[in-house]
C-alpha cells in the first residue's frame, strides 16, 4: 500500500496518539517556536496546516504546510524513528511540493537557523531553506 498524504482534520483519537508518537521522536530544536509537541500539533490542526503520511490506517510522519503570498512553507517535518528511511518524508515533501505548485506557488522548507540536518534536506530536495 502507498503512503497517503492528507490534511489531518478532524483527527481521530488514534490519529492524536500517532501524532504524539511522531513528535515524541523529534529533537527539541524541531519544535521551536512551540513550547511542546502538543502545542505544535494543536496549532497545526486548528489552522488546517498539519499534513501527515498514512500507511495501513496509521500516521507515520507529519509536517506543517503553510500557504503564503510568495511561497508555501513546509516546516516541522518529522517521521517516527521506527519508520525512518522508508520514504515517508520523501512522500510528504513530494505532496507538499505538488500542492504548492497547484496553487501557483513554489515550496520552501522552513527550519530553525543553523541546523545542518535542515540544510542537508533542503540541498537533497532542491528546495530553498527559510530560517526562523
Image: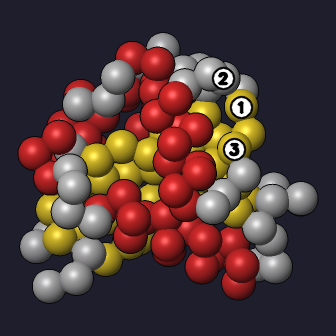
Characterize the local packing of mark 3: few (<14), some (14-19) or many (20 or more) Cα atoms within 10 angstroms: many
Identified at 17% across, 71% down, the residue is: 55
What SS does tag 3 mark? strand
* Mark closer to the chain start, 1 or 2: 2
In this view, 56 is above or below 78:
below
Give the secondary structure at mark 1. Answer: strand
Q: Does residue 81 appear in this view?
A: yes
Q: Is residue 104 left or right of residue 24?
A: right
Q: Which mark is residue 113?
A: 2
Q: Disc 3 to disc 1, how far (Cα)?
A: 6 Å
Q: Quadrant of the C terminus?
A: top right
Label 3 and label 2: CA atoms lie apart by 9 Å
Instruction: From the viewer's side, name the closer residue of 88 and 56.
Output: 88
How far from the left and from the top, in percent, is residue 36?
Answer: 41, 19
Whole-angstrom CA distance, mark 1 to mark 2, is 5 Å
x%, y% of residue 77? 44, 45
Q: Residues within 10 Å of mark 1 (few under 14, many from 20)?
A: few
The residue that mark 1 highlights is: 131
Mark 3 / mark 2, whichever is N-terminal: 2
Residue 42 in view, yes or no: no
Q: Residue at x 20, y 50 (%)?
A: 84
Q: Are marks 1 and 2 in contact (CB under 8 Å)?
A: yes
The answer to whether mark 3 and mark 1 are in CB contact below 8 A is yes
For mark 3, what is the residue?
129
Amino acid at each position: 500500500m502507498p503512503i497517503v498524504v492528507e490534511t489531518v482534520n478532524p483527527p481521530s483519537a488514534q490519529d492524536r496518539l500517532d501524532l504524539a508518537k511522531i513528535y515524541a521522536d523529534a529533537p527539541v530544536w524541531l519544535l521551536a517556536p512551540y513550547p511542546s509537541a502538543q502545542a505544535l500539533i494543536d496549532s497545526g490542526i486548528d489552522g488546517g496546516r498539519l499534513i501527515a503520511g498514512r500507511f495501513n490506517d496509521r500516521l507515520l510522519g507529519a509536517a506543517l504546510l503553510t500557504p503564503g503570498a510568495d511561497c508555501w512553507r513546509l516546516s516541522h517535518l518529522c517521521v517516527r524513528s521506527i519508520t525512518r528511511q522508508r520514504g515517508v518524508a520523501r512522500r510528504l515533501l513530494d505532496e507538499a511540493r505538488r500542492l504548492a505548485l497547484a496553487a501557483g506557488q513554489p515550496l520552501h522548507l522552513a527550519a530553525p537557523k543553523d541546523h545542518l540536518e535542515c540544510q542537508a534536506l533542503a540541498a537533497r530536495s532542491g528546495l530553498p531553506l527559510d530560517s526562523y
